[in-house]
Amino acid sequence: MDLAKDIRACRLCAARFAATATAHEPRPVVWFAPTARLLIAGQAPGARVQASGRPFTDASGDRLRDWTGLLAPEFYDRTRVAIVPMAFCFPGYNARGADLPPPPLCAATWRARVMDVLPQVRLRLLVGGHAIRWHLGLRDVTAAVADWRRHSENGIFPLPHPSWRNTGWLTRNPWFAADLLPVLRARVRAVLEAP
Ligand code: SF4
């Protein structure tokens, strides 16, 4: 069975998306291969990613590449980096113009099965509250990220979402850039370059 192909064909949320202001159709952005060593567990594609069909082709992606020290060719090498969001499709906008949360149905349907076909993952970056909740069962993003040294011993880095909406959070928590990011970059490099 080709799991990636099955996810690309998924239309479970068609009615849900049709009822949003953008009335868009599902377009799953699927980006993984069984040889991947690094997992980037994101939230859900935004409208730009929905259009491009490639994950993180937006300002959040620019910030995430800076955080990880990965240049675009490495970041998009799916044989080494799996980018698996909590929902594979753009969820639409809420009344204030912000992205809706990822439909829980997506993770319930697909996520455990995707994790099962990524046996070589050595490092997991949990990007944002939804991924932190699913993978660690924790609801307080700041507390989870602040506890990064302990989680990193288990091959996990909880991270805030790199959206511009979190620029204030980054300013209020300068230890994130000063202490966490240098270690994160070194761990990412070590995992990708290990023989
Ligand atoms: S968000 Fe997930 S469950 Fe919903 S249509 Fe897209 S792939 Fe299917």
Image (cartoon, helix red, strand yellow):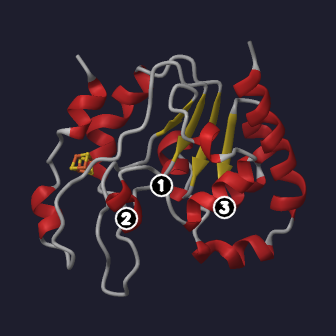
Q: Please say whether residue 20 is visible from this viewpoint.
A: yes
**Residue 85 point in image, percent of width and height:** 43, 47
Residue drawn 42% across the image and 37% down it: 31
Amino acid type of the residue tagged 2 in the rendering: Pro
Q: Any atom of ligand 1 within 8 Å of the CB at mark 2?
A: no
Disc 1: which residue? 130
- Tag 1: Cα neighbours inside 10 Å, few (<14), some, or many (≥20)? many
Residue 138, labelled with which disc? none
Residue at x-position 40% and y-position 59%: 49
Distance between the alpha carbons at the discs numbered 3 and 1: 19 Å
Residue at 63%, 73% in the rendered image? 166
In this view, the residue farthest toward the left is 15
Q: Quadrant of residue 38?
A: top right
Element assignment for label 3:
helix
Nearest to the eye among marks 3 and 1: give it.
3
User: Residue 1: percent from the left, percent from the top?
Assistant: 23, 16
- Is residue 140 visible in the rendered structure shown here? no
Mark 3 or 2 closer to N-term?
Answer: 3
Q: Secondary structure at mark 1?
A: helix
Question: Do residues under tags 1 and 2 come within 8 Å of each other at their CB atoms?
Answer: yes
Q: Name the residue that disc number 3 marks.
A: 63
Separation of residues labelled 3 and 2 (CA atoms): 20 Å
- Left or right, 114 with reference to 18: right
Tell me the number on the disc at residue 101. Answer: 2
- In this view, the residue in front, 26 or 156, is 26
**Badge 3, how many Cα within 10 Å: few under 14, some, many 20+?**
some
Q: Is residue 55 above or below residue 31?
A: below
Quote the CA–CA distance across marks 1 and 2.
Answer: 8 Å
Q: Position of residue 137 (x, y in %)?
A: 52, 45
Q: Quadrant of the C terminus?
A: top right
